[in-house]
Image (cartoon, rainbow, N blue to C red):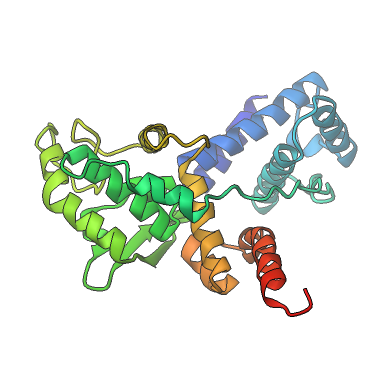
Amino acid sequence: MENVNFTLNLFIEYLQIEKNYSEYTIACYKRDIGEFFEFMQREKIEKLEDVTYSDVRLFLTELHTKKQASRSIARKISSLRSFYKFLLREKIVQENPFALASLPKREQKIPQFLYKEELESLFLVNDLNTAIGQRNQALIELLYATGIRVSECCNIQLSDIDFSLSTILIHGKGNKQRYVPFGSYAKEALERYISDGRKQLLKKAKVPNHYLFLNFRGNPLTPRGVRNILDEMVEKASLSLKISPHVLRHTFATHLLNEGADLRSVQELLGHAHLSSTQVYTHVTKEHLRNIYLHSHPRA
């Protein structure tokens, strides 16, 4: 299997250099392809070019037997299809046995979101006289105001923020950049934090940095740190709900659509490559439209 592992390393280099994928995405590819290599060893398939469509079907049957989620199986097929597409391009194989494999139907889960009343209580829990309180307030205001991903939030540099236009340059997935606007509440919270709280936190750092959000040691805040902060805020607000940065992203999109924003604009703000990723939020707004109809139509 030495040649197989060498080929995987070539593919990983391609993902890093040509596709500029994140470490997390590359780790998922390695794990998915590695699982297929284990299957090849069990089935005594020595070379990648020896894999047939029948082998692919047997591999998928194994995944279903293990009761893996359809979303997980779909991702593995997609990873291996891309891998073989690369092998075809490099003339390492003659055909792609995963080309005919159909993706399992994905369960359409309706995104969890917060109602305005639940959000309001979160905005009131922070002590704005402390550096940590100012940071936390700026954090939740910005996550709700922009709908950015937690990784994007943690990577914001001070130079990315334009207060005159109330926009932030976001470095998204695949190194794609987009400008995202923010409102007056987020602006006020950010200005307070940057002029006061952030300076206090930065004093504790051993090495100065230009990241917007810092932890109590003055170092850049991590995605896990953001999740811990939100958990603490929920506890302080005595709310019986589970909140994450992604729930705030769902909330941002849902509230925009409920107030009449068009799908294309929301897609651009979220940084979705495909409109289908944004369309999931229309399921949430159906209930809202039904309530409007029932309360507004004379013969409802």
In this view, the residue in front, 52 or 194, is: 194
- Is 219 drawn above or below residue 160 in the view shown? above
Indicate left or right for 178 with 44 as reference. Answer: left
Residue at the extreme right of the image, as rendered: 54
Indicate left or right for 218 with 63 as reference. Answer: left
- Is 209 drawn above or below residue 254 in the view shown? above
In this view, the residue in front, 262 or 24, is: 262
In which image quadrant can residue 165 be found?
bottom left
Residue at the extreme bottom of the image, as rendered: 298
The residue shown at (84%, 50%) is 100
Q: Look at the image and tell me whether residue 166 can be seen.
A: yes
**x and y percentages locating residue 262 in the rendered image:** 57, 74
The residue shown at (29%, 47%) is 137
In this view, the residue in front, 269 or 133, is: 133
Quarter of the image with the N terminus is: top right
**x and y percentages locating residue 212 in the rendered image:** 24, 49
In which image quadrant can residue 218 be found?
top left
Q: Look at the image and tell me whether residue 17 can be seen.
A: no
In which image quadrant can residue 280 be found?
bottom right
In this view, the residue in front, 179 or 186, is: 186
**x and y percentages locating residue 118 in the rendered image:** 47, 48
The residue shown at (34%, 45%) is 154
Indicate left or right for 29 with 148 as reference. Answer: right
Quarter of the image with the C terminus is: bottom right
The residue shown at (19%, 30%) is 217
**x and y percentages locating residue 207 in the rendered image:** 13, 36
Residue at the extreme front of the image, as rendered: 298
Indicate left or right for 91 with 60 as reference. Answer: left
